[in-house]
Amino acid sequence: MPADPEGPGDAPRRVARVVLLDPEDRILLLHGHEPDDPADDWWFTPGGGLEGDETREQAALRELVEETGITEVELGPVLWRRRCSFPFAGRRWDQDEWYYLARTTQTATRAVALTELERRSVVGARWWTCEELGQAHETVYPTRLAELLRRVLDEGPPPGPEILDTEIV
């Protein structure tokens, strides 16, 4: 979830996201919406922008705790990297996102430290099977998440981060 956008012409916001899997290989997604339009909604992986001099790994774990309360995590490799640009809360956000694989046995979620903007736009979390994702009619980001997740579950993590197509919404 965005915190502070970069100014026009600046480098994209550096973001760490978490592909969190439980022991049944379900993925945790957060449900969000445009702050002033709950009908404009989507599902997305936990994560957010780097703060100060923290590493992407530190940001991934911090954001996971803040957005889900989940602390018992085994952080794995970077699966994917993606550039994206999207409108949100009256601004355009340009981001360079890294998606980390992570595993947990802790499946209860509770947001513990949302920003004011997140409190207005994040409305819950849900564990999804890969099959449920593939059949979903809801908007999910990244848009090929079901296919990407199926490949990870079938073949394991890629040898290095896969560069996903740039998504501009």
Image (cartoon, grey):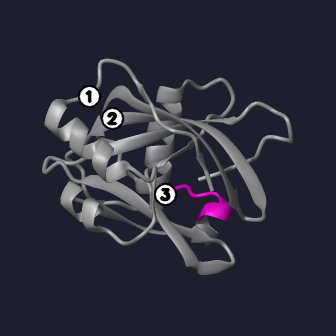
Q: Residue at x 35, y 43 (%)?
A: 19
Contact? badges 2 and 3 (CB < 8 Å): no
Q: Is residue 117 left or right of residue 154?
A: right
The amino acid marked with disc number 1 is Pro
Residue 73 can be seen, yes or no: no
| Mark 3 or mark 1, whichever is nearer to me | 1
Q: What whole-number distance in Å separates the C-alpha atoms at marks 2 and 3?
A: 22 Å
Q: Amino acid at mark 2?
A: Leu
Image quadrant where residue 160 sits? top left
Classify 10 Å Cα crowding around label 1: few (below 14), some (14-19), many (20 and above).
some
Instruction: Please name the residue shown 75% across and 53% down the image.
Output: 92
Amino acid at dot 3: Val
On the image, the x and y values in percent for residue 37 come to 64, 79
Pointers 2 and 1 in contact (C-beta within 8 Å): yes
* Between 132 and 115, the one nearer to me in the picture: 132
Q: Verify whether residue 117 appears in magenta.
A: yes
**Separation of marks 3 and 1 at Cα, in angstroms:** 30 Å
Question: Residue at left 53%, top 28%?
Answer: 56
Q: Are marks 3 and 1 in contact (CB under 8 Å)?
A: no
Tell me, yes or no, whether the highlighted magenta stretch contains residue 60: no
Q: Which residue is mark 2?
A: 101
Numbered badge on residue 112: 3
Q: Position of residue 85 (x, y in %)?
A: 66, 48
Q: Farthest residue toward the top?
A: 159
Per the rendered image, the range of residues in magenta is 111-118
Q: Nearer the viewer, mark 2 or mark 3?
A: 2
Q: Residues within 10 Å of mark 3 (few under 14, many from 20)?
A: few
Label 1 sits on residue: 157
